[in-house]
Amino acid sequence: MDISSQEIEAIVKQVLAGMGGAQTSAAPAAYTAAPGGAAGDRGVFENVDDAVEAAWKAQRDWAANYKIEDRQRIIEAIRRCARAHVEEWCHKIVEETGMGRYEDKVEKHLAVINKTPGPECLTTEAKSGDAGLMLEEYAPFGVICSITPTTNPTETIINNTISMIAGGNTVVFNVHPRAKRVSADCLQTLNTAIIEAGGPANLITMTREPTMENVDKMAANPKIRLMAGTGGMGMVNALLRSGKKCIGAGAGNPPVIVDETADIELAGRKIYEGASFDNNILCFAEKEVFAVNTAYDGLLHELQKQGAYLLNKAQTEQLVNIVLQPKKGGGHEVNKKWVGKDAARILETIGVHVPDTCRLAICEVPADHPFVLVEQMMPVLPIVRCQSFEQAVEDAVVAEHGNRHTASIFSKDVDHMTRFARVIETTIYVKNSATKAGVGIGGEGHCTMTIAGPTGEGITCAKSFCRRRRCMLAEGGLRII
C-alpha cells in the first residue's frame, strides 16, 4: 500500500504530518476528543510514553486475569460495536481522507469485523511419548506498536485489535495523520465497548498527534516487544531498522494474466469489480493486466460492457502527466492528489465526462509504460497485449517488482496457473476471481488488512502476533500407556 516510499524514507526521522498529500476538511465536532492528559481519553493520549505505559499495565492485567473465554467474549463485543458504527466510520473516512468509495468501505469493514479470527486460531500442539509430554502454545509478545495506513485506517485498527488482543497482547497505534480523527473515534469507541464487556481499559491506545518521532520512541522503548506496520516499503524498511521483532506489510503492484483459455466474460466482470473496488487504493487490487493476443480484444469489450471507459492514446498520455509526476532520479511516481479518487473525477481533468456509475478507466499501453510500472492506487487500469502466455508471465514478473504481494490469473489451463504461481511467488495468488477474494472479501478464508509479505507472515491472524512457547514434562510424566 505504498503511496510514496521514497518520500517516507526521506523523512523517517520527521513528523509524518509533513508528508503532504490531499487536503482535508476541518474536523467536525464528532471527531474532536476531550483533552485527556496522562490519564488518557478512552485510549487517546497526548504523550507516547503515557500511551505505552497504559498499554503495558493493561497487558499485565489482560494476560494475568483474563481467560481465553474472556478474550472471546470481549472480541464479540468489539465485533458488535464495530458493526453498529460501520456506516458512520465509512462516511468519516471518505470525508477526512478524500479517498475511496463509501459503499466499498462498508464491505471492507464487514469483512474484517466478521472474518478476522479470534483466539480460536491459537491451536495447541501436543506430543506424548516415552520421554514425556510436550506442549507448544501461542503466547503473547506483550505490547505491540502498530502503524496503520490512510488507505484502510479503521479497517486496520479493527483487524489488528481483534488479532492482537486475541493473542493476549495490547496495542499502541500510530495512525496515519490524514486519518487521525476517524481513527481516534474508532479506537475510543472500541475501548468503550471493551470496558462495558468487562475488559480492562487501554487494551488499545494511540497518541492524539501521530508522528514518526513517536514510532522512533516506541522502537526504543523496552516495553514495546513487537513492531507491526501496514503501509509502504519505506515504512517497513524503517521498522526493520528498529532492531525489534517486526511484522511488515508493504507495497504491491498486482499483475493479472488473461490467457487464451480464459472465460473472457468472467475475466472482464471480475477484473472490473476488483480494480474499481474502493477506487483501487487497496495494495492487493489489480493494478495492470497482461492479456494474450487471442483474448485481448474480447477482454476490452467485456470491460467496456461492465462500464469501463477506454482511453485513446492521446488521452492516456494526457492522464499520465496529471496523475503521475517525475520522480527524483528518473521515472515516475504517483501524484498523491489523485490517489483513491473516483474515475469520473479523474477523467474530467482531460475533458472526458462520464456518469458516476463509471468506476474504471482502461487504457492500451506497452509493458514498459509508467501506468504499468508505478503502483497508482487509483481506478486507471492499463492493459498490455502479449503475443504469448510466456511473454505475459515475463512482463508480469517485471511489473510486480519482486514485492511478492499479490497476483492473479484467468485461465482454464492448470499448467499455466501452476507455472505463473511458481514464478511470481506472491503471498496472495488468485485464480479466476477478483484479487480481493484472496483476503476473504468474496472468497474463502479469513480476512486481514495486514498482509505481511516482506517479513513472511502472510495473511496475518492472532497467531502471527504470538510467540511459540514449549512446555516439557519429562520422564514419561502423565503417560498412561
Image (tube, rainbow, N blue to C red):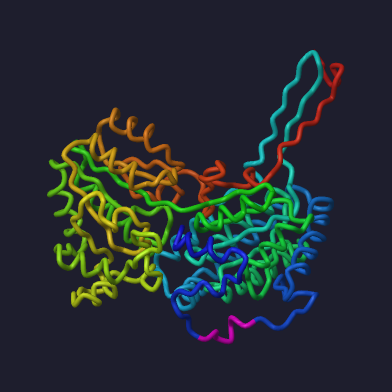
Q: In the rendered image of this protein, does residue 480 appear above or below residue 239?
A: above
Q: In the rendered image of this protein, does residue 167 appear above or below residue 102?
A: above
- Residue 201 occupies quadrant: bottom right
Query: Magenta includes 385?
Result: no
* x and y, in percent, of residue 272 in the image: 27, 56
Say which quadrant the C terminus sits in.
top right
Q: Residue at x 14, y 64 (%)?
A: 312
- Residue 282 occupies quadrant: bottom left
- Residue 197 occupies quadrant: bottom right
Question: Is residue 72 visible in the rendered structure shown here?
Answer: no
Does residue 474 appear to the left or right of 158 in the view shown?
Answer: right
Q: Which residues are magenta?
A: 26-32
* In front of the other: 370 or 164: 370
Does residue 464 appear to the left or right of 313 in the view shown?
Answer: right
* x and y, in percent, of residue 121 in the image: 62, 42
* x and y, in percent, of residue 419 in the image: 33, 30
* x and y, in percent, of residue 8 in the image: 52, 63
Q: Residue at x 49, y 56 (%)?
A: 111
Does residue 419 appear to the left or right of 295 in the view shown?
Answer: right
Query: Magenta includes 30?
Result: yes
Question: Is residue 86 visible in the rendered structure shown here?
Answer: yes
Q: In the rendered image of this protein, does residue 336 appear above or below residue 245?
A: below
